[in-house]
Amino acid sequence: MSVLWILCPIIAFGSAVDAIAGGGGLITLTAYVAVGLPPTTALGNNKFASASGTLIATIQYLSQKQVNFLVGGIAIVTTFIGSTYGSYLATLYASTYLSFLLIILVPSLAVFMLVNPNFGKAQPRGKSFTLVLSGITGLVVGMYDGFFGPGTGMFLTLIFTAVLGLDLLKACGTARIVNLASNIAALSMFLYHGVIDFSIAIPCAVSAIIGGYIGSHLALRIGQKVVKPVMLLVLSLLLIKVIVEWF
């Protein structure tokens, strides 16, 4: 019970962050490990709560028509393919080089967000461009997710708006449906292998649902004024994580 008093508020906060910008797993997974759960159980419990929070956030974005189904549908398919291949690469290579790349890339992305006046504004692209880039985005981000993982939802949101020209809210909503599909697929494997501690997972899932609702509500109500700062927070957390692990 004492563990839940620690976990549930953190999971709710992480889920709110995830619903707004993606990347909440940087907070929640760290919390599960910090309270002493074995790594596999921590991953399973995190995915159970994450799927619950992402589901409620997705429903919120769908209800406000903030999802691009063309981009999201293609990205879901290629994300599965990329994630599978990325997981395979993770068994062959260390993540050292990717960590070094992220140390350079993450600050660059933060600067891009801050100095680009058009970031987050709708900039329609041609259909052929959208089809091809949606597939490539899903493939690349899926490989990153399978190989390394942290901040996947945030990268989807960023690419959907910066490259595919979706406005920031629609990018958030579209990223959530891709995340939801990925979470469900991963969760099914954790359930199959029986590594989820439901005495912890269920209360944390309730917390994640509350956080997911609050986060998506804030994003839909306030828009860029809350989404951009939260994205910068996630980028900062990712940079700290990579630097700590690097050294």
Image (cartoon, grey):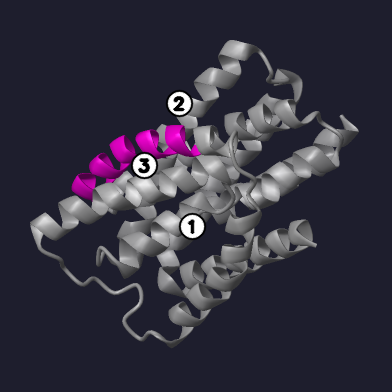
Tell me which amino acid carries mark 2: Ala
Q: Residues within 10 Å of mark 2 (few under 14, many from 20)?
A: some
Q: Could you tell me what secondary structure mostly forms the magenta stretch?
A: helix
Identified at 49% across, 73% down, the residue is 109
Residue 177, which numbered label? 3
Cα distance, mark 3 to mark 1? Answer: 13 Å
> Mark 2 and mark 1 in contact (Cβ < 8 Å)?
no
**To which residue does mark 2 refer?**
185
Task: State the SS at label 1.
Answer: helix
Pinpoint residue 197: horizontal percent, then vertical percent.
73, 20
Judged by depth in the image, the label closer to the viewer, 3 or 2, is: 2
Residue 48, which numbered label? none
Identified at 74% across, 46% down, the residue is 30
Q: Is residue 196 above or below residue 149?
A: above
Q: Could you tell which of marks 3 and 1 lies nearer the N-terminus?
A: 1
Pinpoint residue 150: horizontal percent, then vertical percent.
59, 50
Using residue 61 as the reference point, say whether residue 108 is left or right of it: right
Identified at 73% across, 48% down, the residue is 10
Using residue 154 as the reference point, say whether residue 79 is left or right of it: left
Using residue 79 as the reference point, say whether residue 195 is left or right of it: right
